[in-house]
Image (tube, rainbow, N blue to C red):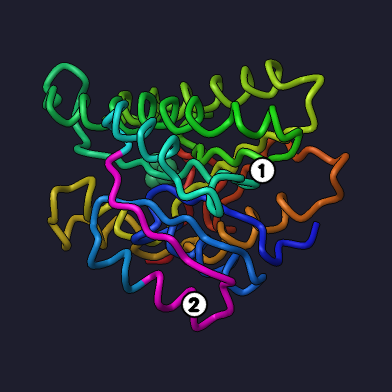
Amino acid sequence: MNLKGKIVFVSGASAGIGAATALAFASEGARLLLAARRPGKLADVASRALSLGAAAVHSIDLDVRSRYAVQRTIDELPPEWAEIEVLVNNAGLSRGMDKLYTGRIEDWEEMIDTNIKGLLYVARAVIPGMVVRRRGHVVTLGSMAGEIVYPNGAVYCGTKAAARAINDGLREDLLGTPVRVTSVDPGLVETDFSLVRFHGDSSRASKVYKGIKPLKAEDIADVILWAVTRPDHVNIARVSLSSVDQANTLLIHREQ
Ligand code: 8X3
């Protein structure tokens, strides 16, 4: 599939995997609809995307937790931006790492509202147009955390297990249409993920990646681009990927 001039919507595009994905699609000459909560950081990604070859960029200040804002954003897209071809449903986060019985309920709500409900709101707003146009590809950012739960991460892992079920259900429900559905499920990726998880505690965050060579955001963007550029009749259902130093969420090799 040639992405030149195709409209690609990336949520959570201001940093990490979302920003790397935006830049990967920019290099292919796509038209980018970039959504995130932090307009300053998003503007920076937008200008880098344009310099890399994006055909055009339209930035949207959006919190996917707001059901009505998501629907309004999609309903009110300028006509030249309405025909979304690829949705990268990426916005998500982890907050806190605590035993379930002592966890902060505010952290849980933020994860559930973003990783599950936000994912659903964006999917619900974008996919009907793909079905009508009989073109489209939905990429859901899952996680290895959706496969095996790790201690102190039950709620985050639960949201990613939900994303996996939602992605699989979506593929079933889109059967009979040409719309493709892919879940990309990374293990440890060195982004702001752990800094956000630990509420800005950088020394705690850096320990997560100590002694391993973690995946980079660009590694995930590369897989997303690969899945989207397979021939039209090929649906990559799921890609699970990790650093060579990680076998699964529970088994990690660290150099001392
Ligand atoms: C990110 C992977 O293992 O840090 O979703 O939770 S992990």
- The residue pinned by badge 2 equals 50
- Give the quadrant of ligand 1: top left
Quadrant containing the C terminus is bottom left
Q: Earlier in the sequence, mark 1 or mark 2?
A: 2
CA–CA distance between discs 1 and 2?
Answer: 28 Å
Q: Which residue is drawn at 58% across and 30% down?
A: 127
Quadrant of residue 94 in the image? Answer: top left
Give percent across and percent down for residue 153: 31, 31
Is residue 196 positioned above or below 150 on the image? below
Stretch of the chain drawn in magenta = 45-63
Tell me if residue 53 is in the magenta stretch. yes
Please tell me in which quadrant of the rendered image residue 128 appears.
Answer: top right
Residue 192 falls in which quadrant of the image?
bottom left
Q: What residue type is labelled 2?
A: Leu
Work out whether 52 lies above or below 130: below
Q: Position of residue 176 (x, y in %)?
A: 81, 20
- In the foreground, 42 or 165: 42
Front position among marks 1 and 2:
2
Report helix, strand or loop for mark 1. Answer: strand
